Image (tube, rainbow, N blue to C red):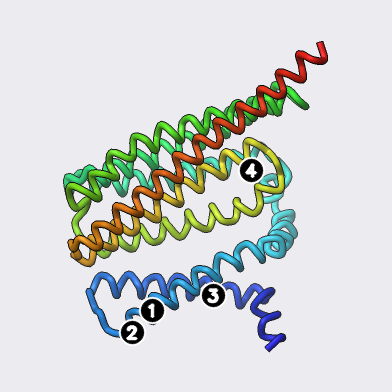
Amino acid sequence: MKRLLAFLKDPPLWFAALIWAGTFAAAGGSIAAVATGDSGGWVYAVYLLAAVFLAYGIYLAVRLTPRMKEGILERANRHAFTGQFVADYGFRTQVFALCSFLINVGCCVYHLVFAVLWRSAWFGALSGYYFLLGVLRGVVLLHGRRAQKGAEGEALLVRKWRIFRLCGAALLVLEIALTAFVAQATMFARPLTPSIISAIVSAAYTFYSLIIAVVQLFKVRRTGDPLLQALRNINFSNALVSLFALEITLVAATGDASEQMRFMNIATGFCVCVAVIGIGIYMIVRASRWLRRAREEDSEEV
């Protein structure tokens, strides 16, 4: 038993790859069960299996990241492009920013198309929300890059905390605006037409958002860098909204318009909005306190 637990705690990469593949398969089975409306006992087994695979898959992604990083770095240094990607922070930041931008563009276009086809204010709101989050991520990266070029030491840290505070304010404004559309989606109308395609896309994007958010949650907290923490909070907010959007999509796909499901959507939407608003307020308060202490210390030195 101890050997089995030790193996599951720190398995080889091939086993982790099988678990990640199983996670996608179990998620697909869950979506298929929801789309077909089957209520047999096997459905609950599939749901449980999907939950276990997802939780264990996220754990493995966090646990095995250092090991995978070593192998990736070793192979990356063999080629010019990948070698520059590893060694040059500025180049690496631009590549990641481009990838995030492309993912956001694809997600925005997808939601915008269905917003027009189904005349759905909810899909339109999601399209705009994901687009603005992508813009916010780009602004943080751009200003962070400029700050690193134009300052160093304490001055650089002050600039980063200002960016952190502005990011919190932007998240706060975005989430307050989204609250109105959450109310529309949960209280007044069904936000979309049931579709297996929308369920699959929503599940895939949610899985991607969760992986990014959880990995950064463990990775960034050790750095103490306000800029990286701002990016982490953006991704975490994105993951929370994606989870709520997935719930809305799956409920609509089942065609269940009961009061119980409606109440569940309202409760989830309320919790998501409160959580992201809380993140924005926390970022503003924390950055303001740090900047005030920095000003007080500077005045005492003078």
For marks 4 and 1 on the same chain, the one whose residue lies earlier in the sequence: 1
Q: How far apart are marks 4 and 2 (CA)?
A: 45 Å
The tag on residue 42 is 2
SS for callout 3: helix
Q: Residue 4 location in percent, x, y?
A: 67, 85
**Other residues around mark 4 within 10 Å, as few (<14) / some (14–19) / many (≥20):** some
- Residue contact at pointers 1 and 2, CB within 8 angstroms: yes
Alpha-carbon span between mark 4 and mark 1: 39 Å
- Between label 4 and label 1, give the one nearer the viewer: 1
Q: Residue 46 carries which label?
A: 1
> In what element is the residue under mark 1?
helix
Q: Are marks 3 and 2 in contact (CB under 8 Å)?
A: no
Q: How many marks?
A: 4
The answer to which of 274 and 125 lies nearer the viewer is: 274
Mark positioned earlier in the residue sequence (3 or 2): 3
Labels 1 and 3: the sequence-earlier one: 3
How far, Cα to Cα, is label 4 from label 3?
A: 29 Å
Which numbered disc covers residue 92?
A: 4
Which mark sits nearer the N-terminus, 4 or 2? 2
Three-letter code, disc 4: Arg
